[in-house]
Amino acid sequence: MSFLRVYRTRDDGTLEFREAWHDDEAAQFVVNHGVVGHVSTTQETNDVDAAAAESLLAAFATQCEEDGFAEVPEAEQDRVAAQFALKSQAGTERDRFLERQAVRALTGHLAWRGLGTVEESAIESGRLTIFMRTVDAGKAVAAIKTCLRENTSDFTKLSIAVAKADAPEEFKLKHAPAGIRSFSL
């Protein structure tokens, strides 16, 4: 699947995004765009083969560049970690179900709002941790809380921490259950 996501900041400070991709299986070329943090607008073109998709993606990239959009390198994106406290150190089948459910929900929720991507998840030391990259940490934290409140039954055990792009391993707690004041991996 070919994919491109780009961003620009308007004169008023609003961050916008555009993305396009070709879905080989569906033979579909998709363009998605909007304001970061808000549900985007999507346009699909059906019956697009791989050669036509490459041409469309090149034209999309050229138009985006002309309009002032550019990719944001991962090194310039903040990292976010959503973490659930578990009842056992190694996790149970229910915990693995929670992991699949949360990752799937977050992947779509963040993507359709131009906020970022889910990088990885892990169950260890009595915690489920899901790592993400984002272009706007504040909006991502709010979106993660909304998404997980709607899609999981374990929201009351959720902590969220952010590490800025210039210090990608220094996570600072942004949301936690009552009584939790620190965050560790």
Image (tube, rainbow, N blue to C red):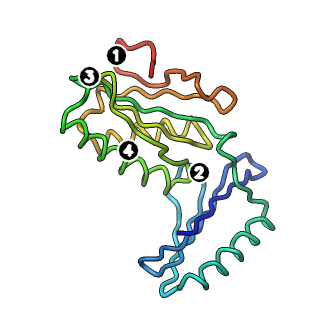
The residue indicated by pointer 2 is 36
Q: In percent of the image, x 43 and y 51: which residue is there?
A: 107
Q: In percent of the image, x 39 and y 32: which residue is there?
A: 129
Q: Disc 3 marks which amino acid?
A: Gln
The residue indicated by pointer 4 is 147
Viewer-side label of 3, 2: 3
The residue indicated by pointer 1 is 178
Q: Of the two numbered discs 3 and 2 on the same chain, state the one appearing first in sequence.
A: 2
Q: Of the two numbered discs 4 and 3 on the same chain, state the one appearing first in sequence.
A: 3
In the displayed structure image, the side of residue 91 where residue 30 appears, left or right: right
Q: In percent of the image, x 57 and y 69: which residue is there?
A: 2
Determine the residue located farthest toward the bottom in the rendered image. 47
In the displayed structure image, the side of residue 139 where residue 77 appears, left or right: right
Position of residue 48 measured from the top left corner of the image (x, y, whole percent): 53, 85
Q: Are marks 3 and 2 in contact (CB under 8 Å)?
A: no
Q: Of the two numbered discs 1 and 4 on the same chain, state the one appearing first in sequence.
A: 4
Q: Disc 1 marks which amino acid?
A: Ala
Q: Of the two numbered discs 1 and 3 on the same chain, state the one appearing first in sequence.
A: 3
Is the C terminus in the top left, top right, bottom left or bottom right quadrant? Answer: top left
Q: Of the two numbered discs 1 and 2 on the same chain, state the one appearing first in sequence.
A: 2
Seen in the picture, residue 81 relative to 88 is either above or below; the reply is below
Q: Are marks 1 and 2 in contact (CB under 8 Å)?
A: no
Please rate how many residues cluster around mark 2, counting C-alpha atoms within 10 Å: few if below 14, some from 14 to 19, many from 20.
many
> Does dot 1 land on a helix, a strand or a loop?
loop
The residue indicated by pointer 3 is 89
Residue 162 sits in quarter = top right
> Does dot 2 land on a helix, a strand or a loop?
loop
Q: CA distance from mark 3 to mark 2?
A: 37 Å
